[in-house]
Every structure is written in C-alpha cells, then in structure tokens.
Image (tube, grey):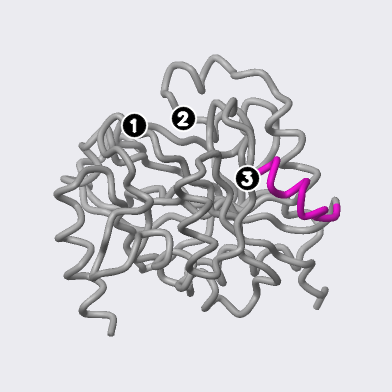
Amino acid sequence: MNALPPCYGIIPTRYASSRFEGKPLALILGKPMIQHIYTRACQCPLLQQVVLATDDERIFSAAESLSIPVLMTSPNHSCGTERVLEAARLLAVPDEGVVINIQGDEPALEPEMLTALVAPFRAPEVQVTTLARAISAQEAQDPDRVKVVMGRDNQALYFSRLPIPFPRDGREDGYLGHIGIYAFRMKTLEQFVALEKGVLEQKESLEQLRLLENNIPIHVVITTHKSHGVDRPEDIAVVEEILKNKV
C-alpha cells in the first residue's frame, strides 16, 4: 500500500456574515467556536498540521490567545477555498500534499470524518475527496441539502439541490446527502481556484460542479456521521446539546 502524503487541515474563518455576524467567536459551552473546531480537527491522527486562516484582526488575536496556529490572509477572497489556497501556499504545502478545507462553522465535527476523507489519497490517482451520507426521501426534498450521485468507483457523477436520482420506480431510498468538507491535492487545489466558474456551478450555486465540468474527478467517501453547522444564533443551542453528548 502506498504511503499517505503529508496532510494539512486549514480552517477558513471570517467575521462578517449576513446571518450571524462574528460567529467564529460565538461562545459554545463557554469556549469560542474556533476553539472547538481546532481541538476536534487536531484529534485526527493523519493531519500533520492544523491552522486557522482569517482576514480579521479580532479572530487572529483570539486564536493567538488560545494558542491556535493562525495565518492572516487577504480580505479580498470571494470564497473560503481561495483563502485555504493562500494559507496552503504560506505553509509551503508540496504539490502532492493534501489540503483539507475544514469548515469554520462545524464545532461538532467528528475527527473520524477527516480520517476517512484523507485515507483515499494513498492511491496516487485520487485528486479530490468529499463526504456523503444516506438521507431520507423527506430530507432529499430540501434544496439546502445538496445531493450527490456516484458511480460504482465512488466517483461523483453530479451534485444537485434537487432530489437525485429521480425515483421513477417509486422507491424512496438511495439518496446521498453531500457533506461539504473537501480534501485536495495541492496541485489540484491550485488548478481549481484558477478555473472560471462553469455553467452548472452558476445554475446550482455549487462550486464543486466546477471540478466535474472540467473533468476533475471527485472521490466520494460514505460516512454515517452527521454534520451540523452553525448558520444562525439559534443553532448554538443545538450544537451545545450535540457536544454535551460527545463528552
């Protein structure tokens, strides 16, 4: 079996948010959200390094006070992936190294999800990985819950906000909900950010479709773990209950 290349976890965070201003510093069980995410990411044994990437002095100062490695990045990035790339360049990640874009609003992240995400990179042909889990037909109707279909080789065929595949046979099983955590080889991350937005990406508002439109395969890893992000202040109470049950 091939050796796993060096793996780096990067947590992109920004203070501004239309739905929850300053949420990276929101207190969850008495600790800032960034502390929960960093601590849980560090529990993945396959990561060589975990760092925070931000463009905000308040987040930078808070991270330093908590002894969380942090990089100051440009305020001009249009998405978290661009911020992750800048941080990866600052870390001098090698071309074949693996970079995980760890969402900055997932304080209940399961470390096993990160382990599963990077394990396929022992195969040299794997360039990008992401996660999915089985969901119900009712969950699949929600356009905010992205769905993915994949081939027998676990490569993604398509992602959509619509419930795919369409159940022409009347069966209401077989739906996979996408979990928006990605790992890239560094050279593929560079390639991805340099690409123009595609037609499908713009229609669905899903940036991963840029990869498929450019024939860059995405390896989908199935997990049983759920993911619960913090989008609004009311999500704090939900995540606190989840974290209490993990202790």
- Range of residues picked out in magenta: 84-94
Do callouts 2 and 3 mark residues in contact (Cβ within 8 Å)?
no
Do callouts 1 and 3 mark residues in contact (Cβ within 8 Å)?
no
Kind of residue sitting beneath label 2: Leu
* Quarter location, residue 227: bottom left
C-alpha separation, residue under disc 1 versus residue under disc 3: 34 Å
Query: As displayed, is residue 214 above or below residue 243?
Result: above
Q: Is residue 152 among what the camera can see?
A: no
Q: Is residue 235 left or right of residue 57?
A: left
Residue 114 at x, y percent in the picture: 53, 67
- Which residue is found at the position 65% from the left and 75% from the top? 46
Classify mark 2: helix, strand or loop.
loop
Do callouts 2 and 1 mark residues in contact (Cβ within 8 Å)?
yes
Residue 100 at x, y percent in the picture: 61, 56
Q: Which residue is mark 3?
A: 72
Classify mark 1: helix, strand or loop.
loop
Kind of residue sitting beneath label 1: Arg
Residue 40 is inside the magenta segment: no
- Which residue is found at the position 63% from the left and 26% from the top? 213
| Front residue (pair 170, 115) | 115
- Which residue is found at the position 45% from the left and 36% from the top? 159
Q: Which residue is mark 2?
A: 206
